[in-house]
Image (spheres, rainbow, N blue to C red):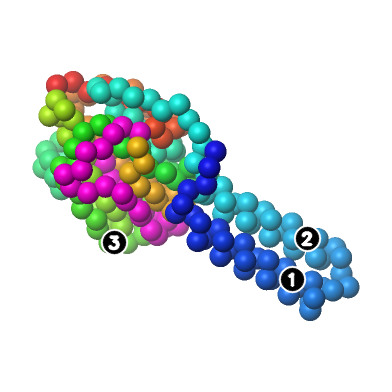
Amino acid sequence: MRLHREGYTIMITTGLVLLALDLLAYFFLFSDNTTAIVLLVIASLILFGLIVQFFRVPTRELTFHESQVIAPADGTVVVIEETSEDEYFKSNRRQISIFMSPLNVHVNRNPVTGIVRYFKYYPGKYLVAWHPKSSTENERTTVVIELANGVEVLFRQIAGAVARRIIWYVREGQPVHQGEEMGFIKFGSRVDVFVPLDADVKVKIGDRMKGGVTVLAELHK
């Protein structure tokens, strides 16, 4: 396991602030109260540990298959439905949504190999990730990847009430590979994946996903 570079500044800043508060308490507030100092240090370590775990990147054996759509994020499947995708396709697609809690790994990965045909970033609101309008009103990105056989897969990074910064590493025209890091949502949120209606969905609502590992759907030309 390693720690993601997106967390370096936050982890260092948090560590320094907590250390300063603990030293201030030790020398000026609770210098004669050992119990209070111990409890404060324990609370600081727990808080720092929670911040660090947000940015963990576990070592995994990734899944690679040219006709499969792999989960772009850790989390729980909360939506599987046919819906109208009106931003890019302007037609019906099968939507699979993965909710990322603050305890999940927050790295996002390319679900397929291909060329980025469309990318758009939208600033927006910070509704809770399960709100029906979060997919269209929250801060988000939309990415469309075209596979070698011409099939296109769209997915969105969506910020939530806690996550307020989306990071991405892709651009239009860029070739990308399945399983590579394509971005990061700080402190969790949601990822929506849109596949063709004839794709065979391999997951069900409530299933827990491992980004880069779990197969979401099988594609057909």
Q: Amino acid at mark 1?
A: Leu
Identify the residue under disc 2.
Answer: 39
Magenta stretch holds residue 167: yes
Q: Amino acid at mark 2?
A: Leu
**Secondary-structure class at tag 1:** helix
Question: Dot 2 surroundings within 10 Å: few (below 14), some, or many (20 or more)?
Answer: few
Give the residues drawn in magenta, as a range: 155-179
Residue 54: x and y, percent?
52, 49
The residue tagged 1 is 23
Q: Amino acid at mark 3?
A: Gly
| C-alpha gap between disc 1 and disc 2 | 13 Å
**Between 198 and 182, the one nearer to me in the picture:** 182
Q: Nearer the viewer, mark 3 or mark 2?
A: 2
Question: Could you say where residue 217 lies in the image, as x and y percent from the top left?
Answer: 29, 25
Q: Earlier in the sequence, mark 1 or mark 2?
A: 1
Of the image marks 3 and 2, the number of the one nearer the N terminus: 2
- Write the residue at 21% across / 33% down: 114
